[in-house]
Amino acid sequence: MLRLDSHIIYSIDRDDVFCYIIPIIQSSEEYELVIKQETLVDKVVDRILEAAKNGDFIIGKKLPIHEELQTMFGVSRNTIREALQRLESIGVVTIRQGNGTYLNDINIKRSLDKLTPILKLNNTDLSSLIVARKTLEVQTAQDAALCATEEDIREFEYYLNEMKACTNDVQKYTQLDMKFHLAVARSSGNAILYKFFEVISDLMHAQQEAVINSSTMVEVSRHYHTGLIEAIKARDPNKAASIMAEHIDNVYHRLSDGIE
């Protein structure tokens, strides 16, 4: 099965190993695949995947710290960081700020990735994506108000502060915004909803960039994020759900205005 992510295709075989990372060249008629020369990052990605397959790294458990991975693979810290970021982008690991990197359940992710071809969207499909997003996020926000730990809340606040520091960088802001929403979903304690949210999160990046295109929208986004954190801190599930619903509705109306 092939999964398209921006200009990279990830090949996933039946043994749950991502076999190749291949760039795509777009012609006027079709995409052509060419083999990319293996880099140090590619090698580290492959070795981590192999270790996960062999059971050397345990699903749901923290991977060794960067220094240990450096020694294990004989590469620099930057190489380890880039390899882990690449693995996070395809759902193999989750990087929790200040708490390490955790191995995800690759089997579940692989199964859910079968939804990706169905979800290749054009503008007319975006409303369906937002409805799905609202259904997931209202529930996870409500659950987060009941289940989020103090550590989870610190993670929310970290992403909020980082977003405040990069309001002029739309791409970085969007990435942090998505990490914030993923962190809320993860803190809900519902692994299935979180996995579904991971699947649609890739599609939501472009949607978010289309919405977060002005300082006004950054302020609106920050308003909802701050309110959501306060509702979760107050252990008020109804308030958290209400804020999230209003937030997603605002995204929908903003996006509708932009494509009409």
Image (spheres, grey):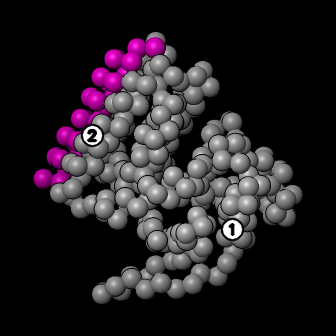
**Left or right of 160: which side holds 203?**
left
Mark 2 crowd level (few <14, some 14–19, many ≥20, 10 Å Cα): many
Q: Which residues are magenta?
A: 235-260
Q: Is residue 164 visible?
A: no
- Please name the residue shown 70% across and 57% down the image: 52
Q: Compared to 42, does 181 lie above or below?
A: above
Q: Residue furthest front?
A: 14
Q: Which residue is mark 2?
A: 251
Q: Is residue 66 visible?
A: yes
Check disc 2 and give the amino acid type: Val
Predominant secondary structure, magenta span: helix
| Mark 2 element type | helix
Residue 48 in the image, given as x and y percentages of width and height: 71, 61
Q: Which residue is mark 1?
A: 46
When asked about the image quadrant of residue 177, the answer is top left
Residues at marks 1 and 2, CA–CA distance in whole angstroms: 38 Å
